[in-house]
Image: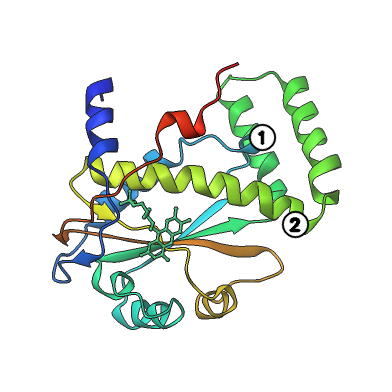
Amino acid sequence: MTAKDYSTVVHERRSVRKYDSSYKLDRALLDEILEEATLAPSSRNLQPWRFIVIQDQELKKKIRSCAYNQEPLETASAVIAIIADCEMYHNALKIYRSKFDQGLMDEVTMQRQIDGIEQLVPHTSFATRLNIATFDCGLVSMQIMLGAKARGLDTVPIGGFDHEQVTEALDLDATRYEPILLLPIGKAEQPGFETTRLPLSDIVDYR
Ligand SMILES: Cc1cc2nc3c(=O)[nH]c(=O)nc-3n(C[C@H](O)[C@H](O)[C@H](O)COP(=O)(O)O)c2cc1C
């Protein structure tokens, strides 16, 4: 994608709240969007995101009921629940070994990285790990939204939901996982509202 294509996608993305509920989303397309999105950066590359892709109509309805009855959760083709894995350190071995196996890292460095993670991350508080994972989930979520838009699909990030109810509805282990965002994805039936942004003069301080 050229810089201009990227800019067009960013400018055209809006939060869409009216979906064509008859539109069926191909799993291969969802996989493509998710795989590309996971190129997002993450703290120590631990990739603390998990995705539950909900297409079952009954489960979508249930999730809607956990989120102040927000319509897109039922009418969009799918809802991607973005879940933080607060025990992301379990992935260290697999992630760094694959980097070593692909010749991208020597063995000593691999072991040093794994040891560094295992000696530190599990001993930080749950709140610290959740904070890290939430940030990383935000990065991957943005990439999903832009990847969807680039392919003619729309999304709306939904953070207004009852976390306990969603945890229960998705049968998550609350000692490890926390739902961060619900992301309806599908074909727009109506465009999203135009929105505005603060001027740079309000938010940027060059020093
Ligand atoms: C973390 C987060 C949570 C949000 N939660 C909701 C929500 O619960 N319901 C909703 O309709 N929109 C929600 N939004 C969408 C925002 O209202 C929207 O992004 C904002 O108004 C700017 O509009 P735009 O996305 O069309 O540019 C959320 C956005 C973010 C980033």
Please state if 17 lies on the left or on the right of 63 as rendered.
left
* Inter-mark Cα distance, 2 to 1: 17 Å
- Judging by the rendered image, the residue that carries numbered circle 1 is 44
* SS at circle 2: helix
Crowding near the residue tagged with mark 1, few <14, some 14–19, many ≥20 C-alpha atoms within 10 Å = some
Tell me the mark number nearer the camera, choosing from 2 and 1: 2
Q: Is residue 2 visible?
A: no
| Quadrant containing the N terminus in the rendered view | top left
| Quadrant containing the C terminus in the rendered view | top right
Judged from the image, the quadrant occupied by ligand 1 is bottom left
For the residue with label 1, is its CB less than 8 Å from the closest atom of ligand 1? no
Query: Residue 159: where, in percent of width, then height?
Result: 47, 63
The kind of residue on which mark 2 rests is Ala
Residue at figure coordinates x 69%, y 41% from the top left: 92
Q: Nearer the viewer, residue 166 or 26?
A: 166
- Judging by the rendered image, the residue that carries numbered circle 2 is 127
Residue at figure coordinates x 22%, y 41% from the top left: 12
* SS at circle 1: helix
The kind of residue on which mark 1 rests is Arg
Check the image and report above or below for 29 versus 163: above
Q: Is residue 175 visible?
A: yes
Crowding near the residue tagged with mark 2, few <14, some 14–19, many ≥20 C-alpha atoms within 10 Å = few
Quarter assignment of residue 155: bottom left
